[in-house]
Image (cartoon, rainbow, N blue to C red):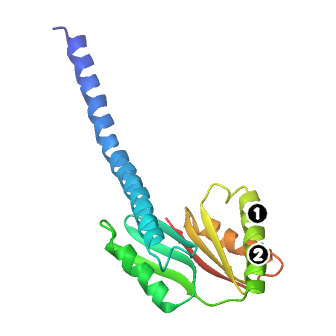
Amino acid sequence: MTKATVLSHCLIGLVLAVFIAGCGDTKENTGEYVDDTVLISKVNEEIFNDPMLKVFQINVESLKGIVQLSGIVDSQIASDRAVEIARSVTGVKSVKNDLLVEKESIGEYVDDTVLISKVNEEIFNDPMLKVFQINVESLKGIVQLSGIVDSQIASDRAVEIARSVTGVKSVKNDIVVE
């Protein structure tokens, strides 16, 4: 073997070692993403299959096994039941309960539906935020934002947009910054 061949083999080995070491982190991060996606799907399925909860719009997010529940339910019992179901799913490390408990009239529901639509539209039209999955709920003009963004600036921008929508009384920010 010539000196150039040995040097070439060493260089190839070094490149492969660096490449394989770099892939380790990517695989783990992808695995976490897949695990969170599976958790979201499983928790959603269990909530939908529960007779008490399937009538509610409960949003489920997950980050590294920490599940976040948001939305509106009509009783503390329903909120507790949703948390119990989420905790029972294998792989869930903990549950953050951001469910709002409130009974509302049909008129308020319609007004809140309009607010949700307007806030969603404004968030979707914002170049910084349209890439994120931000959930919007509203109860009597109080808007709740949840989901996962990559910076505090994005979270603050979502709150700013929600506050700017006519009819929004206040904003509860449950957005997680990853």
Residue 161: image x %, image y %? 75, 71
Spatial CA span between label 1 and label 2: 10 Å
Residue that extends furthest to the front in the rendered view of this protein? 51
**Residue under pointer 1:** 121
**Residue under pointer 2:** 115
Residue toward you, 156 or 171? 171
Q: Residue at x 78, y 80 (%)?
A: 111
Give the label on residue 176, or none: none
Is residue 9 toward the left or the right of residue 101 in the image?
Answer: left
Residue 21: image x %, image y %? 29, 41
Residue toward you, 65 or 126? 65
Category of crowding for the residue at label 2, using alpha-carbon neighbours closer than 10 angstroms: few (below 14), some (14–19), many (at least 20) = many
Mark positioned earlier in the residue sequence (1 or 2)? 2
Rendered position, 84 above or below 175: below
Is residue 161 toward the left or the right of residue 76 in the image?
Answer: right
Helix, strand or loop at label 1? It is helix
Q: Amino acid at mark 1?
A: Glu
In the rendered picture of this protein, how many numbered marks are placed on residues?
2
Residue that extends furthest to the right in the rendered view of this protein? 166
Residue 56: image x %, image y %? 56, 76
Is residue 135 toward the left or the right of residue 24 in the image?
Answer: right
Rendered position, 39 above or below 68: above
Helix, strand or loop at label 2? It is helix
